[in-house]
Amino acid sequence: MKHLSLPVLSLSLLLAACGSQPAPTPTATATAAGPALQKPADLALAAGRARNLSTLNVSEAWRGMTWRVLDAEGDVVRVGADEATNPYQGDTAATAELPLLCLNADGRPAPESLKLDFYNGWAGGEVRLTPPVAGSTLTSRAVADLLCATEFGQGWRMAEFHDGQADGQKGGWRFYANGALNPESRFWVAIDDQNANPWNSDGVRPDAVVPDTTRVLGAQDRSGLLKASEDGRELVFRSDSPLLATLKEGMVLASRPTGAAPAGLLGRVKAIEVQGETTTVYTGEVTLEEVIQDGDLDAAVALDEGNIDYEKSGEMIRAQRAQSQGNLGAQRDFRLFTFNRSPFCLYDHAQRDLSCDDGAAGGLRSRVPSTNYATFDGQLNAQADAFINVSIRWFSLRHFDAGVKLTQSARAVVEAKGSYSWNEARDLSQWQVVFSPITFMIGPVPVVITPILVPTVGTNGQISATLRYEVSQSFNGRYGVEYNRGNGWSGISQHSANVNSQPATVSGTGHAHAYVGAKGILALYSASTSGPQVFVHAKPFAEADARATVVVGQGASFEICPAVGVRADAGVAFPLITSSTWQAQVLDWKRPLPCWTGGQPGPSNPGTPYTDLNLNFTSVTGDVEVDKIDPVSGAVTRIGNLGGNGTLNIVNDLNATGDTIIRVSSISRRSSGIFGSYRRNIDLAVTAGGRTVYDPAGTGCTSCHSAEVYRFTVNKASGTIRW
């Protein structure tokens, strides 16, 4: 069994492997093995698309042969090879998902109007297409035939290259049959005398073996399923559904997604009640090793915008789609949330209000400016892939692993005021992304997962006075759970991270911790975050310990010592694999960052109003933006811009009485040249009355975004400055 540990994560993730792929490129063919493979001169142009979401790293030789619909008239269809078909080595990767062309060759005569020849024979039956399956599922011709029989009933098998006949002789390359097929689809077709099938193009793979007690719903059974309870434990069928003729208590039912059960089904039959035209089947829990005697599953898929189920996703995800007019393309980077214009309140000491919008006109600070509060402001972008691997031998689960590859770009800002402690964590269900179910096959048995991505935030801390701290980090990780017979459960954890911490401000003492993270959930036969699942919860975090001292007449100093890290939990919460649940922390990584320190000399005449306040900028790369913020209303006003080094006297922009908050932002600028990168740099010194009153450290970076770099509070009337 191979698992892909794709180079650090996924989140730059392998777009080359996801989405729909065009028809296979025509390739040079080997010398024909006999007259039956003599290529016709009038092959149709290549057409049709193959769906391939897999990110597995498999042999290029593992391929299968595909055909398409060539033309149709009435209930007669002609299927066959086109210029993309390769009957010698196969033309489509075995990781692609395509329908099987199935044939029920019942010996019916050809319509008299058909002109038959070697390349356009009559198959003597009806053709149908199964739902798409990965070529890797087709481990033998017998397994392929079983898939057709499971889907359509006894007598159905996989169609073969030579099924067409003319004048009693077998032909090749194309044939006629009765049927109505999707004219846009490509599909798997067998060829018996060449190694161009998924089961023999790249060596031999063992077949899945399914006991007689396992029943998989075919096409008629799925259409006959009228209703299913949310947990799949009560199923109402039409009484004429073929499955019911041989179904008994103790057997196992499995199904790919249907209209009545959109996340698929798996359960052991506990009771059957016939009620005239309908029959109710009651099921209970069952493990995979009871469903399959022998079988393997090795899959990894990329998830993009095209896989999202918007009806089940959160309202903010639906709003994003509406804003883009439903045309997000193959988006891999999900803007899960952004609060930077309206941060939410985590703690309101007076109101005990955990849902206030601090950015609104009636928000917390405007309502009670002096109230103790803690707010969280931030952004999270994320991508995800899913992987699952199963190995069962003689009704015994030997190996199972599953999980999610996550890449996150996160920014967290904690701002708090007062004297208290707080602790808050929540799932942001309004930004929840629910993907459409994905069906993998172990032989004829469907294994259905629904990936779900849930953004999360949390913060806790204890402060006295005020604290503002910001950190940004990008993060890659592969997390999950693993089970091995004899060793039990263990966690899967691989990660890397980059961190950028911004200058912090503090008055008094405090500790603050915040994370913005994402839960990756693989729900099995369910679309619920509380049902059977494998889950991982990655939480990139930032924290800071701070202290500040003020000596009247002598000045002030502060020190903030930040740290960043990632914590990740993983677990399994369903009896599908074993009868017990399991959860553990699989990663606890923490890295201290250099401490921020700063200070100010005391003014020569404390209490003397400022008559000038100069912001002196040096070592500037990029642009400088200076804003003032009203501490009561939160209103922001731009008061200055610079395109390089220079000085701004802002004294006339300060409030005549009370405080004025000054915010300085460093704006990145791209350097010249084809490989130019965005850079910013800035150094600030604030002077008043010929004295330096604030001189923070310079800051800069390469290949980074614009950012706020300095924030301080000025009281013009009292001639004081705080940061």
Image: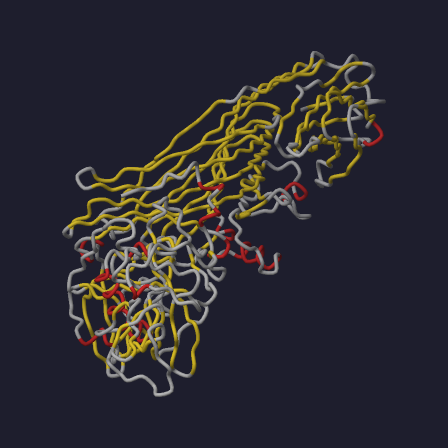
The quadrant the C terminus occupies is top right
Q: Is residue 343 above or below residue 597?
A: below
Res. 721 image quadrant: top right
Please report the residue visible at 34 percent of the width from the left and 58 percent of the height from the top: 439
Q: Which of these two is toward me, 264 or 71? A: 71
Q: Is residue 659 left or right of residue 27?
A: right
User: How many numbered marks, from 0 up?
Assistant: 0
Q: Position of residue 694 (x, y in %)?
A: 72, 19
| 637, 540: nearer the viewer | 540
Q: Is residue 622 left or right of residue 373?
A: right
Q: Quadrant of the N terminus?
A: top left
Residue beneath the point at 48% across and 52% down = 304
Q: Relative to 500, is 66 on the left or the right? A: left
Name the spot of residue 127 as percent of width and height, x first.
32, 74
Note whether residue 358 is visible. yes
Residue 709 sits above or below residue 123 on the image = above
The answer to which quarter of the image holds residue 200 is: bottom left
Outermost residue toward the bottom in this view: 112
Above or below residue 519? Residue 608 is: above
Q: Is residue 645 above or below residue 634?
A: above
Measured from the top left, where is residue 22 in percent x and y? 48, 58
Residue 52, percent from left and from top: 42, 54
Residue at the (32%, 48%) spot, across then down: 388
- Whether residue 620 sits left or right of residue 270 in the image: it is right
Which of these two is toward me, 43 or 130?
43
Asked whether residue 668 is in view, the answer is: no
Colouring of the image: secondary structure
